[in-house]
Amino acid sequence: MPRPLSAAPFRHRHDREIFALAIPTFFALVSEPLFLLTDSAIVGTLGTSALAGLGIAGQVLLTLVAVCIFLAYGTTAAVARKFGAGDVPGGIRDGIDGLWLAVLLGAAAIAIGWPLGPAMVDLLGASPEVAPYALVYLRVSLLSTPFLLIVMAGTGVLRGLQDARTPLAVAVASFLGNALLCAVFVLVLDWGIAGSAWATVIAQGGGAFWYVAVMVRRARSEGVSLAPSAAGLRASASAGFALFLRSVSMRVVALVTVAVAARLGDASVAAHQVSHNIWALLVFAMDAIAIAGQAIVGRYLGAGDVRGTRDATRRMVEWGVMLGTAFTLLVLLVLPWAWIPFTSDPQVRVLITASLVVVALLQPLSGVTMVLDGVLMGAGDQRYLAWASLWTMLAFLPFALVVPPLGLSSTGGIVALWVAYGIWILARAVALGHRARGTAWLVTGASRP
């Protein structure tokens, strides 16, 4: 049995394997929200309307990508199971089909998103001053969607094979390329918000090329064909359907928070853009443990080791709490200066500071939620995750939608919105914790029926 947290908080027999995956995954994951944080800091020099436009367009793009998250998460769990069972070529085959599916879904996202761009921007409540910025950023950045989905699929395969270093290298290189290009295009060449979007397209394209090269090399070494398999494409799409429903529910929550913030005013949606990206930075950091959990739990269950699965899960939850507590202290420490890189608007500054107080307090609970989500995903328990996401979304909506009619001040409104978001996190923690205490998710073997 594992030692209790209080007896040995920093020493445990599973720590080595957790950190071997979690540490490089941490740095890879935090580079993702750093894309938007860097864009926010640079676009913020163009004014509040441009920053708010980035916030609106960013949520639309994240929605298009999030519904395809199964390309990474579902693939990690499936490949890790086969890795644990000793079937590496089978895992590579799943990965090749995932790459082809990513290309098809990326092309579909462009075809759907381009003509519907104005309607989506309007749906999120962009004001006449904000909407032009949002539409320009959205339409240019849509071109990066196939590249990003390829990156997601490649990341899932390599993490399933217990390789977290290659995704780290790709993520860091893409972030640095994006930051440099964004600064040049916006601040030097004066391309405006479109320059920020083009920087993202080029950086994501480079990352996609890197992953394709790695996967081609691994496939050839294992004797796996590079041609798509119709059966494999169907299996990948079918396996990802439950994760698709989960992602849709989660994106509804994110989109509703943006829509509510937009109805509180341009300053509120600009502040929410910053505070939400800081939240995402912290969540992705804790998600490093969750993604390590996907790979570790999948490998243990593939090898038929239920006891090892339970033991590793308990330890990862402990680390989720510890990291969450550390992030609470960190946010509160930097709170007086957190607004400085993003805005010079006094009202936006006040709203950023107020919302970050709630963000800070939610971190330990968020750590538990993220880890349990990753553990159940690694076990292939996608159906439960889909239903849990649906019901917790329904629990969140009344609390969020009541915020605008309350007629609160700008500060009161943004705080109330983040409190509603916290209620959603609490509901998820309860639903996932209930499942993890049971045994229905502990299915062993190279694949889950």
Image (cartoon, grey):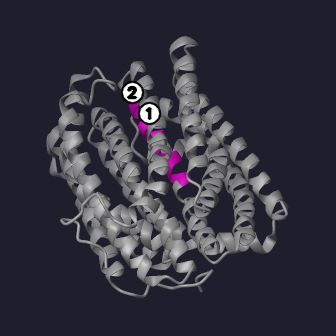
Label 2: element kind: helix
For badge 1, the amino acid type reads Gly
What's the CA distance linking mark 2 and mark 1? 6 Å
- Looking at the image, residue 39 sits to the left or right of residue 409; the answer is right
Residue 42 against residue 433 in the figure, above or below: above
Residue 208 against residue 342 in the figure, above or below: below
Which mark, by number, is residue 137?
Answer: none
Q: Please report contact status of discs 2 and 1: CB closer than 8 Å, yes or no.
A: yes
Q: Position of residue 157 (x, y in %)?
A: 64, 60
Q: Picture quarter containing residue 408?
A: top left
Q: Picture quarter containing residue 209?
A: top right
State the predominant SS element of the stretch in magenta.
Answer: helix
- Looking at the image, residue 63 sits to the left or right of residue 228; the answer is left
Q: Residue furthest top?
A: 188
Question: Does the image show residue 248?
Answer: no
- Looking at the image, residue 315 sits to the left or right of residue 30; the answer is left
Label 1: element kind: helix
Which mark, by number, is residue 53?
Answer: 1
Query: Are there few (<14), some (14-19), or many (20+) residues within 10 Å of tag 2?
Result: many
Question: Does the image show residue 131?
Answer: yes
What's the residue at 45%, 65% (across, down)? 293
Q: Could you say which is closer to the camera, residue 296 or residue 389?
A: 296
Q: Position of residue 176 (x, y in %)?
A: 54, 30
- Looking at the image, residue 276 sits to the left or right of residue 175; the answer is left
For badge 2, the amino acid type reads Ser
Q: Could you say which is closer to the camera, residue 379 or residue 89?
A: 89
Q: Which residues are magenta?
A: 51-65
Q: Position of residue 378 (x, y in %)?
A: 50, 71
Q: Which residue is mark 2?
A: 49
